[in-house]
Amino acid sequence: RSAIVPVAGLGTRLLPATKSQPKEMLPVARKPVVQYVAEELVANGIEQILFVTGRGKTSIENHFDHDPELARLLAAANKHELLEHLSAVELNAKFFYTRQRLQRGLGDAVLCGEHFAGEEPFVVALGDSIIGLNASSQAVSRMAELFQERHASCVLAIEEVPPEETVHYGIIEPADAEGDVFRVANLVEKPAPGRAPSNLAIAGRYVFSPLIFDMIRRVQPDSRGEIQLTEAIQLMCEEGRRVLALKLPPGEKRYDIGNFGSYFATFVEFALVESEL
């Protein structure tokens, strides 16, 4: 029912565009990145979403808030098509916000949502990653089903990446690699090419049991003072917990808005499916 969406990152690889604007609010075709993420989650049955924000991220809150003055002006001007676009932002879900006061990594950002998640399993969806063209993915639903059917502690969405790009992602070591679902033996955060245990990268979607919060608290900060979520998942693996991976099909690839190259490519691909343009 619940999802945590970390959006507190500084987006330094997208400067100067992100100097005063969150990277999650950069437009991809008609909509900002984070709206695609929210639409995907709602389409997969998520009922409440917690955004873990940071300094300078209030535009995310404003985007999902109702704007009666703007709606009134559009109605008075008979701009009904724009009204429809505006109403599309008001998704059928409850939105909550909390701040990660210090930049202490993805693990710490997820820990900020502990009281929100409570004792129920929950989804984590990275706010700068869109799954599937126009977010038309049912991966989260399949992950949730797998989590329940296999009594897992964690399910990860994964995708194949070129070997030279492993340095940008959390990379898994599969215990077995038969089919599209398999058990995870180990994880490595951003390994250098040639040192990665595979080319299977975590694709920005996770399903967790509340056990993950205890694991995060046990992780020691890295050299940059950050608490890595991959290390918490690795502790699950070391303790024999069931950590599973679901490989994304080609039609549901991850669009990572982490750098200008991937952002430009995503924008063009999404824009080209706009038939009237």
Image (cartoon, rainbow, N blue to C red):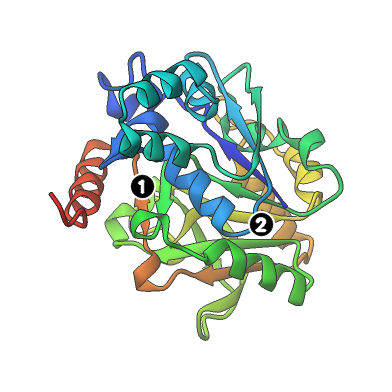
Q: Is residue 134 positioned above or below 72 on the image?
A: below
Q: Residue 207 shows which numbered tag?
A: 2
Write the residue at 77% across / 36% down: 116
Circle 1 SS class: strand
In the image, taking residue 223 as reference, residue 221 lies left or right, namely right
> Can residue 199 be seen from the camera position used here?
no
Determine which quarter of the picture holds residue 75: top left
Which residue appears at 65% of the width and 52% of the height? 46
Farthest residue to the left: give it.
277
Q: Amino acid at mark 2?
A: Val
Quick check: 71 left or right of 148?
left
Using the image as rendered, state which of residue 234 and residue 128 is in the foreground: 128
Q: Residue at x 31, y 23 (%)?
A: 77
- So how many labels did they put on this image? 2
Residue 277 appears left or right of 124:
left
Q: Is residue 159 above or below residue 34?
A: below
Name the disc covering residue 256, or none: 1
- Mark 1 or 2 closer to N-term? 2
Q: Residue 253's image quarter? A: bottom left
User: Viewer-proximal residue, 122 or 211?
Assistant: 122
Residue at position x 61%, y 45% in the image: 92
The picture places residue 216, in percent across and down from the top left corner, at 73, 40
Q: Find out whether the residues at labels 1 and 2 contact each other: C-beta distance under 8 Å.
A: no
**How would you rate the neighbour count of disc 1 (Cα within 10 Å): few for under 14, some for 14-19, many for 20 or more?**
many
